[in-house]
Image (tube, rainbow, N blue to C red):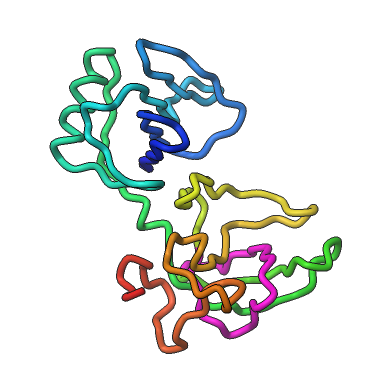
């Protein structure tokens, strides 16, 4: 479950993503918008007027136990029961670039395969000019929400399937060196599958 809050962009609104879905159905209920898939399953919530939660942050946030308790009380008063436990951090892992090929229909894109420690490597289309075979990189896997609010989904870029994103420091919300362009390249001795949260960046 992902929580997104940006007062400057959206005002006092909390966005909750439970799971990725397309062709959603929206249902309004007392300053809460329920987002459901075609089968009627709840996949997200837009909760307005959340001043009493005293939220802080500019993108993905983590709720305190007190904030969760207040939010659950409000939801339950509207007949909504969900489990608010969950973290976005699990979706960001270290991967190793195994292959890199030119995209067949885009000069500035590469088609990579990346080992993140799962049974099969991921095919990921990447637009960074510095991506290379053998690099250790940060991979945002499907279901990750970026600090910008972008939700990573399985997609096609110019006709080629992509199952994640190779991340730059800027995209991860980390301090940026303006002279360094492209994706973040990690030390070669970092173990594949390590969580981003466990790196000292």
Q: Nearer the viewer, residue 22 or 73?
A: 73
Residue 21 x, y percent position in the rendering? 54, 35
Give the percent coordinates (x, y) of residue 122. Answer: 58, 65
- Near-viewer residue (92 or 39): 92
Rendered residue at 41%/88% (across/down): 189
Q: In screen coordinates, is 75 left or right of 164? A: left
Above or below residue 182? Residue 157 is above
* Residue 11 image offset from top left, x and y in percent: 40, 30
Quadrant location of the N terminus in the rendered image: top left
Quarter of the figure with residue 47 = top left
Q: Is residue 11 magenta?
A: no
Is residue 116 placed above or below 40 in the rendered structure?
A: below
Toward which corner of the image does residue 52 lie, by quadrant?
Answer: top left
Q: Is residue 165 visible?
A: yes
The magenta region covers 118-139
Q: Quadrant of residue 16?
A: top left
Q: Is residue 137 highlighted in magenta?
A: yes
The answer to whether one can see residue 18 in this image is no
Instruction: Please report the residue visible at 42 percent of the width from the left and 65 percent of the height from the top.
Output: 174
Total marks drawn? 0
Rendered view: 192 above or below 125: below
Residue at the (86%, 61%) spot, across then down: 105
Residue at the image point whose x is 24% and y is 42% from the top: 63
In the rendered image, the quadrant that contains the C terminus is: bottom left
Q: Which is nearer the eye, 156 or 187?
A: 187
């Amino acid at each position: 479950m992902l929580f997104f809050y940006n007062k400057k962009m959206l005002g006092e609104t909390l966005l909750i993503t439970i799971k990725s879905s397309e062709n959603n159905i929206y249902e309004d209920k007392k300053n809460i918008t329920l987002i459901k898939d075609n089968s009627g399953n709840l996949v997200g919530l837009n909760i307005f007027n959340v001043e009493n939660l005293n939220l802080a942050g500019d993108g993905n946030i983590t709720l305190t136990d007190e904030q969760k308790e207040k939010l659950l009380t409000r939801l339950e008063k509207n007949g909504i029961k969900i489990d608010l436990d969950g973290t976005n951090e699990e979706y960001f892992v270290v991967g190793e670039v195994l292959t890199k090929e030119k995209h067949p229909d885009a000069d500035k894109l590469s088609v990579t395969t990346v080992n993140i420690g799962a049974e099969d490597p991921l095919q990921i289309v990447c637009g960074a000019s510095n991506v290379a075979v053998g690099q250790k990189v940060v991979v945002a896997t499907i279901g990750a929400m970026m600090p910008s609010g972008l939700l990573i989904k399985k997609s096609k870029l110019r006709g080629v399937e992509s199952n994640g994103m190779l991340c730059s420091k800027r995209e991860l919300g980390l301090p940026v060196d303006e002279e360094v362009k492209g994706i973040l390249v990690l030390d070669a001795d970092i173990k594949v599958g390590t969580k981003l949260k466990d790196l000292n960046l």
